Structures are given as structure tokens and as C-alpha cells.
Amino acid sequence: MFENRVLVVGDVMLDRHVHGHVRRISPEAPVPVVGLLGEVSTPGGAGNVAAGLAGLGCEVALAGLIGPDAEGAMLREALAAKGVAGLELVERPGLATVSKTRILSEAHQQLLRLDRDGDRSRYAAFEDDLLARALPLVADASAVVLADYEKGAITPKVARALVAECRRLDVPCVIDPKKVDFAPYAGATVVTPNLLEAERTVGRPLADDEEAGKAAEELRSALDTDAMLITRGPQGMTLALPGAVHHIPSQTRDVADVTGAGDTVVAVLAACLGAGWPVADACRIANTAAGIAVGRPGTYVVQSGELRAAWGGMSPKILDAGDAARLLAEARRRGRRIVFTNGCFDILHAGHLACLEGAKRLGDVLVVGLNSDASVRGLKGPSRPVIRQDDRAGLLAGLACVDVVVLFDDPTPVALIEAFEPDVLVKGGDYTIDAIAGADLVLARGGRVVALPLVPGLSTTSILGRKAG
């Protein structure tokens, strides 16, 4: 979707998610005993912004400070796995790489978080080293992000120097602020405080659109920025531009996890501004991306394909095979159980719904492989499908039990099953297990194959027959 180069400078950190089952309370203290099932490490902070940009197709350079420790090495590996190739990390003795470790139950309930923040004063002591690494990179960037999490990397000197260089070179600069005093961000293209950060800075509650609009314009004018964007969660966004204030409604449908939503907004804004989009349009598509991100569990990196589809009015649940494979791989790393089923779903009816709800109960993430129009014609003849593929996909995506919909052109979904590696394969009907396409692949990996009974008298063929009669 985007191919421009973006520079991210800020507080990089490692996010670790340790998940396990809870079966008993410790005899030593009234705390749950977690039986370890797995651990996932992902980039956090400025690293998550960089990963988000890479997911959108951007070429990313990331500058930050880390320590010569195991967490720093793990962070490098996690960034590389997310496609962030331009690592400009300054590693110095005496620094500890910032990390957050979350302990989660098998049901994905967070039980505990351990933070390793390091020493801000030690980080600040290397501000000149960070600037020496970051400033020369501005000239080759189409946009710059300052991801300030108040961990010590973005000192007032670093912020002012980078904003000034962006202004000198006419490069858009997007800042995600955490400082109470926004003065170091003066002159940036757009600053993106969340509601709490904006209230803290202006010193009053912002209870409605009017109050948020006044505060956004007040901050924009005081800092001489091109724009001020206050992200307000369920209330959407408030954007102040010279002479105009816009309120952008939230596009969130179901909230699974708000972690990293702000990073998503900043990444999409920078990608858009670097590609020459107007600020207002960039904020609207960033709002769409945030709606996708909070609908997914964990810290989710929005992919270019799903954002393009959602921006075009399609459900973010409708993915191509590549984006779906990435989403499912991340879900699997987090210990989530993947269920796959497939069908034509031409004239969606109560029998389909019963099968889909039954499939969802067998795991955490339900993926539906949907035969394309060409595939349906090949299987059922030239008079089918009755409902075209985009409408069938949209209907399926509207069901609460369905998490992902992927179209396929082949007669069977074997290629998707091979790519997605589901834990459970489900088919509705009186099939024997060996007659279900892809069953051998799932069983060979130790998975489960289930045939769910159909609802008597309910099928697309019988519905069409009654209509013809």
C-alpha cells in the first residue's frame, strides 16, 4: 500500500508475552501457579511503530538506544522478524534495554506485568550519540516519527533537533508525546496525544467534542504545529487544523485489545504524510487502522491488504491468504487455537450459522475459507452462485463467531489448510474423516478433524428448490 521510506526515532523496547495454564493456587502465597506453555517476544514502543510501518509496506529505519544485554539481542531478532531492516540502534555499556513482560493465563487474561524501564538519566546521557545516528537519516526519509515514551531517549534536545531538521528539509514529522510539557515538540507537523495526555497538558477535563476541539486548537496554536490530533478511544479523534476542527467518529466494532492502538495511528499517519496525503485524509485512514488493531488480540500489526480493504468499505475480517497467514501465525505464537472450515455459503442460512458457531466453540480463532464465484461455478454449474463472492464474504464477516474470511479459487481449500496449519479442521455434513479435504495434513501435525451434523431440511439446494416450486 505504501512504499516510501520512514524514519522512526524513539524509545525502543521489548514486549514479552508469557502464557500458560492456571490449575491451582500456590501453597506459598495466595497467587495462581502458571504452568508455562509458551513465550512470544515482539517489538514494543518505537519498535512497534516501526513494525507497523513495515506491515504497511514502508521501508523503515529505526534509531533508538539499547543495552548490551539479552533483551537487546531479542529485540533485534523480533524487529527483523517484523520486516524492520534498517536498524540504527545505539548500543552502549551501562544501559538496560527497556522491556515489559506480561504473564497471561490460557484464557489470555493478563495476570501480571513486569517492567524493566532502565535509568532515564543514563539514556539521556547518550542523546548526542542518538542524534549523530538519527539526524543524517532525515534527508533520505519521506516522513519522520518521534515515538516518545518518556523512557529517556527523546530528551528535549533530541526532539527539538529532529523537528528543526525536518522543518529545514520539509519532511513531515509526526510525534507521539508522553511529556507533560509539549514545548519540545513545537514546530512538528502533527502531534498525537491521547485524551489523558491532552487533559494533563491543558490542565482540565475534555468531556465532549467541543472541549476536545478547543484544547486541540489551543495546543496546535501554542506549538505552531500544522495539526494537533487528540485520540479519544470510543469517542474517535479530534483534529485541529488552522481555521478548522474535525471530529472523526471511532470505527471500532468489537474491542479485543487496545494495546498498541496509538502506535498504529502514528505509523499510518507517517506513511500517509510521507506519500503526500492531506493531513485530514491521513487521520481518517489512521482511524480506520486503529479500529482494525483494537479488534485483534495482543499488539497487532495492521497489514496493508486489510487496511486497503477496510478503507474501501470491506470488513477488516476479509483477508487475502498472505495477510491471513501472518495473522494466524501471530495468534498461534500467543497460544491461540486455530479452527478452519470452508464452504460456498451461497444463500447463508440457519444451518450454516449452526455449523459456524459449533466450529468456533472448538477453538479461539475461526477461519472460513470461502469458494470464489469461479470456484462455485466449477463445482455447482453455471447458474451458481446466487450471491456474488464479495457479498457472501461480507455476510460471513458480519457474524460474531467468524474471525477471518479468505476467498479461494481452487475446488478444495487444501492450499489454505497447508498454509494456515489449523489446529482443528471442521466440515458440516455426514462426511467420513478421510473424505474431508485437508484432513490428512491436519492429522499429520497432531490436529483434530471434526464433522458437524447438518440441520435437517436446511441447505441452499433445498431452499432454491422450494423457491422454484
Image: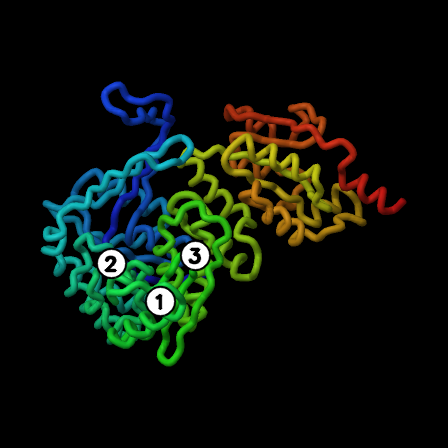
- Residue at the (29%, 61%) spot, across then down: 176
The answer to whether residue 319 is above or below residue 6 is above
Q: Earlier in the sequence, mark 1 or mark 2?
A: 2
Do the residues under discs 1 and 3 have CB atoms within 8 angstroms? no
Query: Which amino acid, by three-letter code, is at mark 3?
Result: Pro
The answer to whether residue 343 is above or below residue 218 is above
The tag on residue 380 is none
Kindly identify which residue carries mark 2: 178
Q: How many marks?
A: 3
Query: Which amino acid, by three-letter code, is at mark 2?
Result: Lys
Q: CA distance from mark 1 to mark 2?
A: 14 Å
Residue 139 image point, x, y percent: 27, 69
Quadrant for residue 272, please give it: bottom left
Residue 159 visible at all:
yes
Q: CA distance from mark 3 to mark 2?
A: 20 Å
Q: CA distance from mark 1 to mark 3?
A: 15 Å
Residue 110 image point, x, y percent: 34, 37
The answer to whether residue 173 is above or below residue 8 is below
Q: Earlier in the sequence, mark 1 or mark 3?
A: 1
Q: Earlier in the sequence, mark 3 or mark 2?
A: 2
The answer to whether residue 190 is above or below residue 419 is below
Kindly identify which residue carries mark 1: 229
For the view shown, which residue lies furthest in the top direction? 27
Kindly identify which residue carries mark 3: 234
Query: Which amino acid, by three-letter code, is at mark 1?
Result: Leu
Do the residues under discs 3 and 2 have CB atoms within 8 angstroms? no
Q: Secondary structure at mark 1?
A: strand
In the image, taking residue 140 as reference, residue 399 lies left or right, namely: right
